[in-house]
Image (cartoon, rainbow, N blue to C red):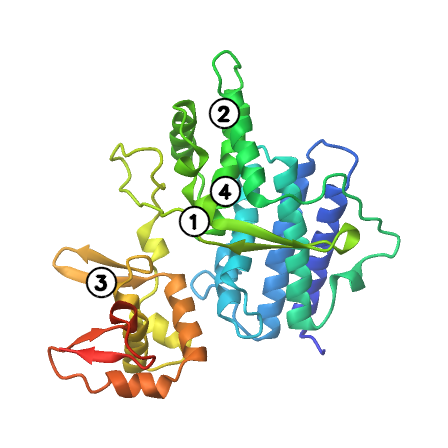
Amino acid sequence: MKLRSSARILKKKALFSMRMSVSAFNSMSEDGRATSVLLHVQHAFEMLLKAALNQAQVKVFDPKTGRSLGFEAVVRQAQQASSIKLTDEEAGTLRAIDAMRDDEQHWYNEVDEGILFLHVRAAVTLFDDVIHRVFAERLADHLPRRVLPISVEPPQDFQILVDREYANIAQLLKPGRRAGAEARARIRTLLAMEAHNEPDTKVSDTDVIRVEKGIRAGKERDQVFPRLSNVGATISGEGPEVQVRMVKKGGLPVTYVPDGTGADVAAIRTVDLQKKYHRSATDLAAATGLTLPRARALRAHRGIDVDANVTHTFHFGSQRHIGFSDHALSLMRDARDTLDMNAIWLSHRAAPAGTTLVSCMQVGCASTGTLLP
């Protein structure tokens, strides 16, 4: 593949940082090891995704500031770019690593060895997937033959690791231990891993204190961290051939509560709703390559406008604005690529004034949707 000059430089930087993260992980020294691993692996993916976007001639500079996009913006672009096709699970893996890196770089956290290994191994697998998907290369093509991958502890089930870490934190918080600082550092890591499910995850001291109170009160893990019940990992191969991919699965229902209400610690911490539901109807249409009327028909067919998980209505005085999340865009793209858009359009376009569009998600109609007065 003939690479653009910028893409070639960015890919080279990505490979350098990935090799540095592997070297840091396998280091015999524990001093600053987790910090170095997380910093390098996050940088490796930012450079790799920017290389892939640059090669696809997707802009990676903010037109307002003239500076290159940050990590989260690059992940979102990679989810939209047809040449990369970053899945929600893959984006979640990167966001979790970035959240752990953010705490390690700007404050401190404590990452359990099993959790670190699972995420770094997943990162290596994902890096290989992306570089092959975009550049038709393999990570092994860029590693020296002398590398000897060794792991004393093989990857463990994600839920077992989270349960074990939660139990460790509970022990540290027992009266008389005086280990609150270490416990809070470990809490930060578990909060960071919620990024597997929630793109807008930011670890705040308020969340740490809330979780600490819940653990001290004897709450079960699935009460305090319900989001983590939806995360798992598929592990295949063994030894040097092991591959780890983070996946989402069915879990406990999640509850959102307004901040400052004194709600039970089991409730999910709040997020910036304007950041989560940042897309307009026009954005969705443009991102899916549809006209506004066709995009509206597709939204109605998928029940997006009535799905509280992917849309939110903002009230600014007398004005009303509907925002959509990135997941709404993913749902629309999946529907656009797998369903008959012409049939959906014909079903919805002739709605008379005052007609309510009812989705198949609501009434269980045929695949082309239906109209109900």
Q: Which residue is mark 3?
A: 321
Task: Judge whether 248 appears above or below 172 on screen.
Answer: below
Q: Which residue is mark 2?
A: 170
Q: What residue is at 24 percent from the left and 85 percent from the top?
A: 349
Q: Amino acid at mark 3?
A: His
Q: CA distance from mark 2 to mark 4?
A: 18 Å
Q: Position of residue 253 (x, y in %)?
A: 36, 48
Few, some or many C-alpha atoms within 10 Å of disc 2 (few <14, some 14-19, many ≥20)? some
Q: Which residue is mark 1?
A: 251
Indicate the secondary structure of the residue bearing disc 2. helix
Q: Position of residue 275 (x, y in %)?
A: 36, 54
- Earlier along the polypeptide chain: callout 3 or callout 1? 1
**Foreground: 61 or 179?**
179
Q: What residue is at 22 percent from the left and 62 percent from the top?
A: 321
Q: CA distance from mark 4 to mark 1?
A: 18 Å
- Earlier along the polypeptide chain: callout 2 or callout 4? 2
Q: Position of residue 218 (x, y in %)?
A: 41, 25
Task: Judge whether 146 appears above or below 345 on screen.
Answer: above
Task: Please report contact status of discs 4 and 1: CB closer than 8 Å, yes or no.
Answer: no
Few, some or many C-alpha atoms within 10 Å of disc 3 (few <14, some 14-19, many ≥20)? few
| Visible residue check, residue 160 | yes
Q: Amino acid at mark 1?
A: Gly
Indicate the secondary structure of the residue bearing disc 1. loop
- Earlier along the polypeptide chain: callout 4 or callout 1? 4
Callout in the foreground (4, 1): 1
Q: Which residue is mark 4?
A: 192
Task: Judge whether 18 appears above or below 130 on screen.
Answer: above
- Earlier along the polypeptide chain: callout 1 or callout 2? 2
Q: Position of residue 308 (x, y in %)?
A: 28, 58
